[in-house]
Structures are given as C-alpha cells and as structure tokens.
Image (spheres, grey):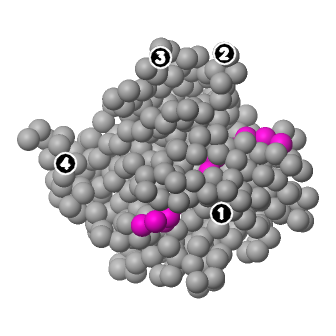
Amino acid sequence: MSVKRWCALLILLLLPQQIPAQGFAGLGTEAEGFAVPERGTQLEFPADHGAHPAYRIEWWYLTANMTGPDGTPYGLQWTLFRSALAPRDGDGWSAPQLWMGHAAVTSPHTHHVAERLARGGIGQAGVTADPFEAWIDDWQMAGPDFGQLRLTASGPDFAYDVELTAKGPIVRHGDEGFSVKSAAGQASYYYSQPFYDLAGTLSLPGGDVEVTGTAWLDRKWSSQPLAEDQSGWDWFSLSFQTGEKMMGFVLRGASDFTSGTWIGADGKASALPDDALKAEPLDWHEVAGRSVPVRWRVTVPERGLDATVTAINPDAWMDTSVPYWEGPVTIAGSHEGIGYLEMTGYGD
C-alpha cells in the first residue's frame, strides 16, 4: 500500500463517527478542551487567513459561478477542511491535524468530483497566512495576499486553473465575525470575500474551456458550531444583478435556526437576525438514494427579497467521505442573479 493510500485510510479511521449525522467532524459534539469562539473578538488580517489549531474544525471554502465562450454556465468548488484530534499543532506524525480537500466542476449535465485526504505535520497539507497559501497534495490556493489568488485542482476526469482578483472588501458575518448557529448560543468565527472576479481554464473530458465569472470565499473556524439536535443545514450565497449579495443559512433541528448577511454593492454588511430569512423547498429530487430540495423560495421581507432559487444541475451530489449536495443556482423573482447552494444532512 502506498504512503498516500495509507494516509487516506488512517484519516478515515480517525475521523469522529458523528460524521454521517452532523457533517464534518461531529459539529454538535462537546468542545472537550478546544477553544470556543467569543463575542467581541476582533478578527485580524492577514493572520486570520491562516490556520487556528486550538479550534477543532476549520475550512477555506471557495465556490464560483462561471460562463464558457458559448454561454454554458459552470460551477466550481475548492474546499480545504481541517479537523483536530487535540487542541494543539505539531510536526511529524504526532501532529493531531487532519485535512480533507474537495474539488468539483458542475455544468447543466455533468458533475465532476474529487477528494484528497491528508495528515498534518508531514507537509502534505496546510495553510500559511502571509503570503497566503492553502494546499493539499498538488491542489493549491495561493497568492501574495487574499486579494489576488491562483486556484488549481484536478481529479480523474477534470482539472482547473483559475485566477481570482478581489473587487470589494472582506465581509464579517454576524457580530463582527462572531456568527451564532443556534438558540443555545453555539457559534463560529465567520467571514467571506464575496467579490472575486475569476478567469481561467477548465479541463474537461470534451476539452479545455476558457471561463470567466465571479467567486465567493468563505472562512470559518469553531469547535462546536451546532446544537445537539441540529441535523444539517441549507446554505445560500446569492449574488444579485443589482450588485447586492446575500449569505443565508437554515440550520435544521427541533426548531430551525436561521441567520444571514445582506451585503450592499459597496460591501457594507448588515446582519439578518433569526427568522428574517425564510427558505421554503418547492421541488425535490432523488440523487444518490436521497431526496434533496433543488428549488427553493427564499424571502427576506425587510429587503424586499422574494425569489426562486433553482439548481443548475439537480445531480450535483458530492459523493465524498462526508457526502452532501453542492452546486450553482440561478435566482429569479424580485431579484435576479446567480449563486451557490450547499445542503447537508439529507437522508443520512
């Protein structure tokens, strides 16, 4: 067995068993000695672009809406997850950090997915803040800073190489980056760079495709961001033709919890409190033996939003170690636009 395959097997054996029920790394379990987000903490850049090993879980999560020369819409995903077995960092095989990478390219009729698994401390995966670099094997998101990045990844039947240029400010969600996830007070630190312009190349079975578009990068870290009764979430990142944007999520549980951020065209962020956002499933689709909602009515009355959000490809299932649905969407109604939808916890 190769070293790489042994690392993958080891990580799958060590990842907490709550994964099927609550997504990555047992998000509803106790913090058990890990650091916990505190309201009033000031996020600091570029330092917070890097890893936070005192916290149990963390991710660098980029999605993009793109168009090819013939007008075909495409979606792109690049994600690096960090999960800690203990609240510390270290070198070599004793390092308690586990890493997982997901990459995908979605079109109206195809969905290409790849996954990488790595153990921290041996150079196979990691993140540095300044200059910024996030990598797992030969997948990379890197640049002199968060404003200018190059993104690469590949799988058995696809690859991409794109450049990202930020055209607006970083956005802090919740209370200056302290994002509450339940009525009980579980929270994460959470900020985004939702203003990237994108240009580059997709390498697909039919040949290379030059694409242009926009991208949205999410950053989160925490140790217990879900309550015990929460089984999954529906997360929307929506970009409207007006230049405004909205991030919103529904955490499903005994009583659903919602939160979001309305982002002006100038980058000014306004927090949406619990219940300001409503998301109602309209159509369901069978994929990978699960029934998932792929068309939604999303409303925020105080902002005049009443829109239908529809998946470009209903079969955008991430058949990875931690399975979920992730894909590009269109927006129609009171607001027009494009965006991304992520859904976890369906049929687990």
| Residue carrying label 2 | 69
Around disc 4, counting alpha carbons within 10 Å, would you say few (fewer than 14), some (14 to 19), or many (20 or more)?
some
Around disc 1, counting alpha carbons within 10 Å, would you say few (fewer than 14), some (14 to 19), or many (20 or more)?
many
Which residues make up the magenta segment? 336-348
| Position of 82 relative to 35 (above/below) | above
Q: Rounded to the nearest whole Å, what is the CA distance between mark 4 and mark 3?
A: 33 Å
Q: Can residue 48 be seen in this snapshot? A: no
| Residue carrying label 4 | 7
Q: Residue at x 42, y 26 (%)?
A: 158
Given the image, on which type of amino acid does mark 1 rest?
A: Phe
Q: 17 left or right of 318? A: left
In the rendered structure, does residue 258 fall within the stretch colored magenta? Answer: no
Around disc 2, counting alpha carbons within 10 Å, would you say few (fewer than 14), some (14 to 19), or many (20 or more)?
few
| Residue carrying label 3 | 206
Q: Rounded to the nearest whole Å, what is the CA distance between mark 4 and mark 1?
A: 33 Å
Marks 2 and 4: which is nearer the front? 2
Give the mark nearer the N terminus: 4 vs 1.
4
Q: Residue at x 58, y 16 (%)?
A: 210
Q: 271 left or right of 52? A: right
Q: Rounded to the nearest whole Å, what is the CA distance between mark 2 and mark 3?
A: 14 Å
Q: 149 left or right of 20? A: right
